[in-house]
Amino acid sequence: MSSLLPASRREQELADQAKQVAQEKVQPVLQQVAGEVGDNLREPAQQAAESVKATAQDAKDTVADEGRSAAQDVSGRAQHATGTVRSSTNGS
């Protein structure tokens, strides 16, 4: 029933004071918890970043090795084709 009646000025002042006191008490705790969460997440985030970096480096090295291998393969085939063409023209 009391929720249907408008709050008196004194009740409103007390509610505002209670809210302010609660915020003053809770704010430092929230800041501490936020700092702890940040500290707890820092190392896993750094480890994840290092893992991504290592995976990217491995992929770069793999692509470079495959590129060199493909270039050598093409060069060998080109030399073979050149030899085949020379044999054909010399034999004709």
Image: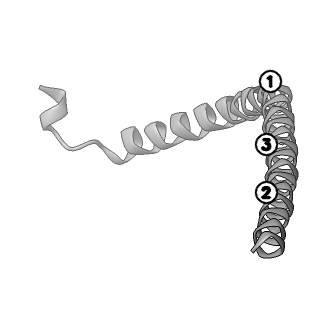
Q: Label 2 is placed on what type of residue?
A: Arg
- Above or below 70: residue 27: above
Mark 2 or mark 3, whichever is nearer to me:
2
The reply, left or right, for residue 38 in relation to residue 25 is: right
- Above or below 22: residue 68: below
Task: Kindly identify which numbered label has been placed on residue 59.
Answer: 3
Comparing 87 with 82, the one in front is 87
**Residue 30 horizontal/vertical position (percent):** 69, 31
Q: Distance from label 2 to label 3 (Cα)?
A: 27 Å
Q: Residue at x 15, y 38 (%)?
A: 5
Q: Distance from label 1 to label 3 (Cα)?
A: 30 Å
Mark 1 or mark 3, whichever is nearer to me:
3
Comparing 62 with 44, the one in front is 62
Q: Earlier in the sequence, mark 1 or mark 3?
A: 1
Cβ atoms at labels 1 and 3 below 8 Å apart? no
Q: Label 3 is placed on what type of residue?
A: Ala
Q: How is the image coloured?
A: one colour
Residue furthest out toward the front: 92
The residue under label 2 is 77
Q: Distance from label 2 to label 1 (Cα)?
A: 57 Å
Secondary structure state at the residue bearing disc 1: helix
- Above or below 41: residue 58: below
Comparing 70 with 6, the one in front is 70
Q: Residues within 10 Å of mark 3 (few under 14, many from 20)?
A: few
The residue under label 1 is 40
Q: How many marks?
A: 3
**Residue 34 horizontal/vertical position (percent):** 73, 33
Residue 32 position by quadrant: top right
- The C terminus: image quadrant: bottom right
Task: Kindly identify which numbered label has been placed on residue 13.
Answer: none
Q: Label 1 is placed on what type of residue?
A: Asn
Q: Residue at x 86, y 62 (%)?
A: 79
